Amino acid sequence: MFDGKQVFARLSSEGVCTVTLNNPDQLNALNTTMADECAELARMIASSSARVIVFTGAGRAFSAGGDLNYLIELTRLSAAESQASMLRFYQSYLSLFRLPLPTIAHINGACVGAGFCLALACDMRFVVSGAKIGMNFVRIGLNPGMAAEFWAQEFASPILKEMLYTGKIFNASESRFASLFNLVASAEEIDFAVKETAASIAANSPQSIRISAEIMRAANQSAENIMLAEARGQGICMSSGEIAAAVEAQRANRPFRFKI
């Protein structure tokens, strides 16, 4: 589907889009080349038949965070110029997570700094036992970026706040990090779990999942507003969906492929 210099993506016939950060020699450090390719890929996925996105990294890391050479280059700019550059940088990567599709982080190794923020942006996170995780921005004199503080608020997580304030690197297998992940297991088990989860999502109604994703990602919603959005979405599904055909197939115990 996409084969860039530092990002590639493949789209299965079932609608599973696997996006791989591909800069293994630098542990998939996030740089401007990768950022531009992510923004381009987001536009392609938006008009594709993708039903779920899986993010992973080439080699032995998911992502070691921002490219330090790029950060040093920004120190030569004015505060206003570096601010604008960083905002464009964040938005390029996060454009992939603003698509109305479920997202899965397949954390195959070290996942640090801005790389860990990308994993937190995913709806689900599956991590290989022993992977190093953390957000070490403050250790190089930089306040956190890539919406790091947002995730700490969103998860209401004192553990994420500890990561942000100490800059320490931790082991994902520590039991106190369990709430951040769907599963922590061996590489083989994680690979199977990610594939099975992605396949299960892709088999469901794309229309209903997109509506649900948009509702779940809307910030600070009351229960009443969520129910209103749910009812609106169900009205759309009932009037334009494939509910009757899906129920008939389920009752007959035969497979059904949603088209919407």
Image: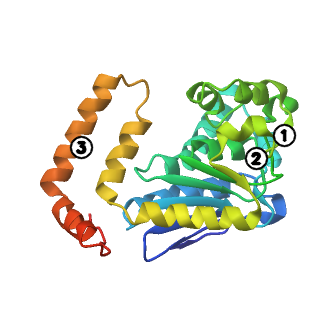
In the foreground, 17 or 189: 189
Assign a secondary structure to mark 3.
helix
Q: Position of residue 79 (x, y in %)?
A: 70, 26
Assign a secondary structure to mark 2.
loop
Q: Are marks 1 and 2 in contact (CB under 8 Å)?
A: no
In the foreground, 1 or 16: 16
- Left or right: 223, with 11 as reference point: left
Q: Position of residue 35 (x, y in %)?
A: 62, 53
Height in image: 163 above or below 65? above
Label 2 or label 3, whichever lies nearer to me, is 3
- Left or right: 39, with 89 as reference point: left
Rounded to the nearest angstrom, the CA distance separating label 3 from label 1 is 41 Å
Rounded to the nearest angstrom, the CA distance separating label 1 from label 2 is 15 Å
The answer to which quarter of the image holds residue 8 is bottom right
In the foreground, 95 or 49: 49
Q: How many marks?
A: 3
Please tell me which of labels 2 and 3 falls first in the chain: 2
Query: Given the image, on which type of amino acid does mark 1 rest?
Result: Phe
Q: Which residue is mark 1?
A: 170
**Which residue shows up at 27% across the image and 35% down it?**
229
Q: Position of residue 197 (x, y in %)?
A: 53, 61
The answer to which quarter of the image holds residue 56 is bottom right
**Which residue shows up at 59% across the image and 37% down it?**
87
Assign a secondary structure to mark 1.
strand
Please tell me which of labels 3 and 1 falls first in the chain: 1
In the foreground, 23 or 210: 210
Q: Which residue is mark 3?
A: 233
Height in image: 232 above or below 190? above
Q: Which residue is mark 2?
A: 65
The numbered dot on residue 159 is: none
Query: Given the image, on which type of amino acid does mark 2 rest?
Result: Gly
